[in-house]
């Protein structure tokens, strides 16, 4: 063998594993001594070392991929994180809402009355969400359609009667809600499902605030 045949592979030494480097040195020594048999054996050893290194690399990559998948399964999803963040935001807002608005149905546009004075852990956005959530509940709709229903502002101050238009609208929403609840019960989910009036209006998120006809979140 011509010693110059080693030149294409000599530059690879710095990228080889210790086993590959040792096999390469044996190959170079064999070529220098013109020992063809030893050179063939050294070349075979070098090939084996390279194959083992590739197999180890594949195994490492597979292990890293498995670990990444496991971490992805245990890590909370973006949806779960959003739910947790929303729950943390809503809880103090609900408590504050009950304190400031002990009676319902609420006065139209009552959300604006909260702008001036809010605790540090309650935002106006959370108040609007809480108002929307409450105003779409079955209890709230029942209060709207009850005979002689009246609206109330902060501190339970009387804000006047519920209009006929609002009463008719609430009655329709209440009937739709009860229809959905009946369907859920027939499907076997009646004890576990919580159907809100917002679903009757086509909303996919019970906490998404939406103004009712006439303005305001407290209808």
Image: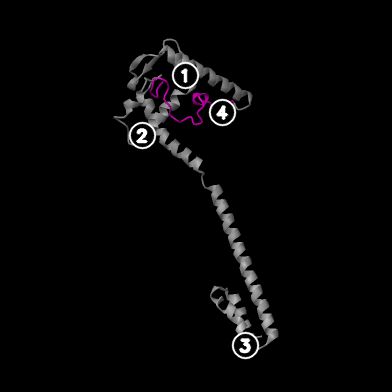
In the drawing, does residue 39 fall left or right of residue 93? right
Mark 3 and mark 2 in contact? Answer it, CB < 8 Å. no
- Say the numbered circle drawn on residue 141: 1
Residue at numbered disc 2: 123
Q: Is residue 204 magenta?
A: yes
Residue at the image position 56 percent from the left and 48 percent from the top = 73
Residue at numbered disc 3: 32
Give the mark toward the camera: 4 or 3. 3
Occupied quadrant, residue 26: bottom right
In the drawing, does residue 13 fall left or right of residue 140? right
State whether residue 143 is above or below residue 58. above
Residue 64: percent from left, percent from top? 57, 58
Q: Residues within 10 Å of mark 4 (few under 14, many from 20)?
A: few
Magenta range is 190-219
Q: Residues within 10 Å of mark 3 (few under 14, many from 20)?
A: some
How far apart marks 3 and 2 lie (CA) works out to 81 Å
């Amino acid at each position: 063998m011509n010693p110059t045949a080693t030149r294409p592979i000599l530059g690879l030494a710095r990228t080889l594993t210790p086993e590959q480097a040792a096999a390469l040195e044996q190959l170079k020594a064999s070529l220098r001594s013109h020992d063809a048999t030893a050179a063939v054996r050294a070349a075979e050893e070098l090939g084996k070392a390279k194959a083992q290194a590739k197999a180890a690399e594949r195994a490492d990559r597979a292990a890293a991929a498995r670990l990444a998948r496991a971490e992805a399964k245990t890590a909370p999803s973006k949806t779960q994180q959003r739910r947790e963040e929303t729950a943390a935001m809503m809880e103090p807002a609900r408590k504050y809402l009950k304190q400031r608005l002990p009676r319902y149905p609420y006065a139209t546009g009552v959300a604006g009355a909260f702008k001036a004075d809010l605790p540090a852990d309650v935002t106006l956005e959370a108040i609007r969400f809480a108002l929307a959530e409450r105003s779409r509940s079955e209890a709230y709709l029942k209060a709207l359609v009850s005979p002689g229903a009246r609206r109330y502002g902060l501190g339970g101050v009387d804000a006047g009667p519920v209009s006929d238009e609002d009463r008719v609208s609430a009655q329709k929403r209440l009937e739709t809600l009860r229809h959905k609840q009946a369907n859920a019960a027939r499907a076997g989910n009646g004890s576990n499902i919580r159907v809100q009036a917002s679903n009757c209006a086509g909303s996919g998120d019970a906490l998404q605030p939406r103004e009712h006809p006439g303005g305001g979140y407290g209808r």
